Image (cartoon, rainbow, N blue to C red):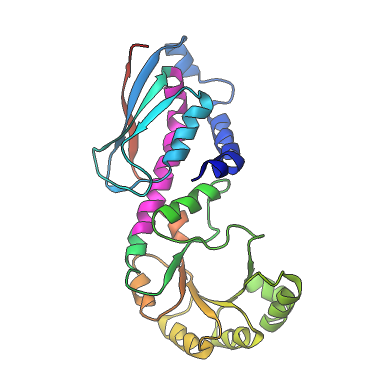
Amino acid sequence: MNPITMQLVADKYIRLALEEDIHSEDVTTNAVMPEYKKGEVQLICKEDGIIAGLPVFERVFTMLDPDTEIKFNVKDADPVTKGQHLATLTGDIRVLLSGERTALNYLQRLSGIATYTNTVAGMLKGTNTTLLDTRKTTPCMRIFEKYAVKVGGGSNHRYNLSDGVLLKDNHIDAAGGVKEAVLAAKAYAPFVRKIEVEVENLDMVREAAEAGADIIMLDNMTPEQMAEAIHIIDGRAKTECSGNITKENIKTITDLGVDYISSGALTHSAPILDISLKHLRAVEN
């Protein structure tokens, strides 16, 4: 995550997370450590995976105290193993204690997403299919979770509702049909915007292709239905497969030759990667 993005967008969410956890004060830390004392603590990985979110982890502590120093032994996207020493943090012990949970929450969550994404993306190697995430993200965590998908080897679908046209079932119902929805989008949206249509059956596939959709999302279709849909589209639009896509069933779908596979599971179902801060000790100034 580049410094400009961190300062313009991510900082406000990190600050809110810290305010949520600390609120008025960290009572426990202030009780056992009432005054400044310099210390250091180690960041230890407790299971194998892909690390992601180190800049966010670091920013939690430097937001509390700019003098906090972190020496990383790894960088984002590196594979990590159980027991590996990932970093050493040095600074005010009160800051190390107060920032610990928020920083680890980010790092564990993002590393879990990167690890899960990396596993799924590996199943697409050697194919022409691109793995995409979705907007099924944790509120106020999207910038971080989508970043983790990229670290893990996936690609980002639209970031938010302003980022592209995606006509789903309720939009189509509101417009009165697939053709009407596509024509309305073409009339309203800037010409640089792609128009994607979510379809649920082969009749909708035909209508979307004939209306000039740029991307046709095949939602919750069987492999047989998807194969027929791709035949109907015949290159007139890019194809995307979506709906309950997981690492367990993705291989069946890649063989069909769809251009994109989008999976909400990348962000909403990835387990965290277990990481801890250990061996806190005081050091000389």
Identity of the residue drawn at 39% across and 52% down: 114
Question: Residue 132 at x, y = what percent?
Answer: 47, 64
Give the quarter of the image for residue 161: bottom right
Q: Residue furthest top?
A: 35
Question: Residue 229 at x, y = what percent?
Answer: 50, 86
> Left or right of 191: which side holds 22?
left
Instruction: Tell me if residue 108 is in the magenta stretch.
Output: yes
Give the quarter of the image for residue 93: top left
- Residue stretch in magenta: 94-118
Q: Main secondary structure of the magenta part?
A: helix
- Which of the two residues, 237 or 253, is positioned nearer the viewer here? 237
> Left or right of 210: which side holds 217?
left
- Which of the two residues, 107 or 243, is positioned nearer the viewer here? 107
Instruction: Tell me if residue 61 is in the magenta stretch.
Output: no
Question: Residue 169 at x, y = what percent?
Answer: 63, 73
Q: Which quadrant would the C terminus be assigned to in this image? A: top left
Identity of the residue drawn at 76% across and 76% down: 187
Question: Residue 98 at x, y = what percent?
Answer: 47, 24
